[in-house]
Amino acid sequence: MFRCLCGLFSNSHSNINDIPPSQESASEGQIGKYIAKVSPCQADPQSWMVHACARRISDKTPKHTEPQSSTTCSMLSALKRRTEEENKERWLCAAKQGDLPDIQALIDSGVALNMINVANPDGTTALIFAALNGHVAILDILLKITSVDVNAADHHGVTALLAATHFAHNEAMARLLKEFSIDVNAADSEGDTALIRAAFQGNRQGVEILLGMPEIQVNTTDRSGASALKWAASENHLQIVAMLLKISGIAVNTADDCGDTALIEAASEGHIEVVRMLLQVPELHLNVKNKNDKTALNRATTRGHDKIVTLLLNMPGIRHGNTLTAQ
């Protein structure tokens, strides 16, 4: 999904003398071939290529004062478009690779101001590239540009915050979350928010950072209907389960598309400490059934998790077959 745009060009001429003399009267298409050989990560907006090609064009222009021919104008337009494309690729490459001097040079030259939110064919911007690779220094520079879109997303719905979270770049997450306009609850095409992703991965520090945001929505579910709590319970991330259960308004009984709650999932997977922690929540529904008509007790019994079976049977109000224990 993410790829560097560097390396698309090769065999670049190191100086103008490398251009064969026979190309002195190069056509517009041939000039384009020479321009295309300049690496976008190395090209400079004021490079010799711009001057050289412009000089070749001017050499063909009549000395007397006349309007430029349509051919000359089209060649200049093509040259300008090519230069803009090279600068765009250089900009994105620098952000991905963490090339701070090149990013700063493009900003200082004024070139970057028109490219701050440009993206590659996948929709990945420089900000997303920097977050994806944990380049905090690059993020800091980009976020100081007022026109930067901090919530820009690629074609998969991945924002800079989601990209940083996906690879557990917690410092990058913290830097992005300082932005007033950041959407902490943005979700990708799979419905994953930063909190859901961090909880699933067991990124305790990332979850802690996100829970510190006043606008965080802890009960959001992904496309499968699973919440951050359900994923943390499923993956046996005990500390994260504990952190989430402390949040006021946490929906402990949320079920996914299969009807599985955090309790059913933990009991099924044999995560006894998670089960024990969930059983301490007064609002917990012990006897809820999933879409296969199975409760947490049914799943623990089927999977042979005897200690969890015993733990559940000792809970007041647990239903065992047609028997309901005393409340």
Image: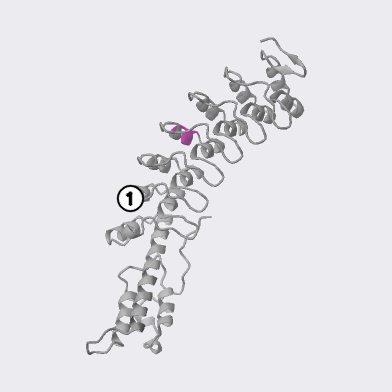
- Residue kind at label 1, given as amino acid type: Ile
Residue shown at the point (43%, 82%) measured from the top left? 30
The residue indicated by pointer 1 is 141
Residue shown at the point (50%, 57%) measured from the top left? 122
Residue lying farthest to the left in this orientation? 65
- Residue 324, percent from left and from top: 72, 14
**SS of the residue under disc 1:** helix
Q: Is residue 255 left or right of residue 207?
A: right
Residue 301 sits inside the magenta stretch = no
Residue shown at the point (59%, 41%) measured from the top left? 223
Q: Is residue 51 left or right of residue 10?
A: left
Res. 280 image quadrant: top right
63 or 243: nearer the viewer: 63
State the extent of the magenta-drawn residues as a range: 204-208
58 or 36: nearer the viewer: 58
- In this rendering, the answer to whether 80 lies above or below 169 is below
- In this rendering, the answer to whether 319 lies above or below 172 is above
